[in-house]
Image: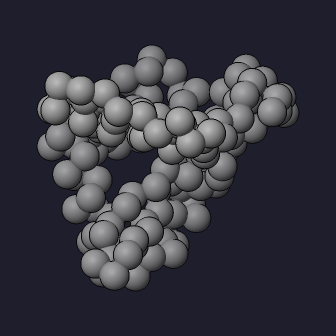
């Protein structure tokens, strides 16, 4: 499904400073309790250790890094998954406006991922056993 961007990249970056100030002001009030803040910080620092993120940086350091103040602040929130309450840090690109500047040109159907998983499982089985065996929908 095609979904056009509603804001251009230029418009987004031109509004970056006031968007960032508003979001940082809201983040200062913080919607998370202390335990959630600690879990989010630990999850974020783990991503830094793994090399998936860099930082933490101050607002001034980010502006120096980019060479201007037209950069987005994506606040993070936390989800707990499953009975084990696995911590999952989520970047909120909706609140920063980033999602508005993104154009979707296709829609991934879930069965595509399931099909790929089955194909990879069959390939792994074939490689380990040295033979290929497929059951077709028509029973052959």
Can residue 122 be seen by looking at this rendering?
A: yes
Can residue 14 be seen by looking at this rendering?
A: no
Across and down, in percent, residue 108 comes to 64, 36
Q: Nearer the viewer, residue 84 or 59?
A: 84
Q: Nearer the viewer, residue 90 or 55?
A: 90
Find the residue positioned furthest to the front.
Answer: 140
Count the marks: how many?
0
**Which image quarter: residue 17?**
top right
Across and down, in percent, residue 99 comes to 68, 40
Q: Nearer the viewer, residue 6 or 134?
A: 134
State the quadrant of the N terminus.
top right
Q: Residue at x 53, y 36 (%)?
A: 140
Across and down, in percent, residue 90 comes to 46, 55
Q: Residue at x 17, y 40 (%)?
A: 50
Q: Residue at x 33, y 39 (%)?
A: 121
Across and down, in percent, residue 79 comes to 44, 68
């Amino acid at each position: 499904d095609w979904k056009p961007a509603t804001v251009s990249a230029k418009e987004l970056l031109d509004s970056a400073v006031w968007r960032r100030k508003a979001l940082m002001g809201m983040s200062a009030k913080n919607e998370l309790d202390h335990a959630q803040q600690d879990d989010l910080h630990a999850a974020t620092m783990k991503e830094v250790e793994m090399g998936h993120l860099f930082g933490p940086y101050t607002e001034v350091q980010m502006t120096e890094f980019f060479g201007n103040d037209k950069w987005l602040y994506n606040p993070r929130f936390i989800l707990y998954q499953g009975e084990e309450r696995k911590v999952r840090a989520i970047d909120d690109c909706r609140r920063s406006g980033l999602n508005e500047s993104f154009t979707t040109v296709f829609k991934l159907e879930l069965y595509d991922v399931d099909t790929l998983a089955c194909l990879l499982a069959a390939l792994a089985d074939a490689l380990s056993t040295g033979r290929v065996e497929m059951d077709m929908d028509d029973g052959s």
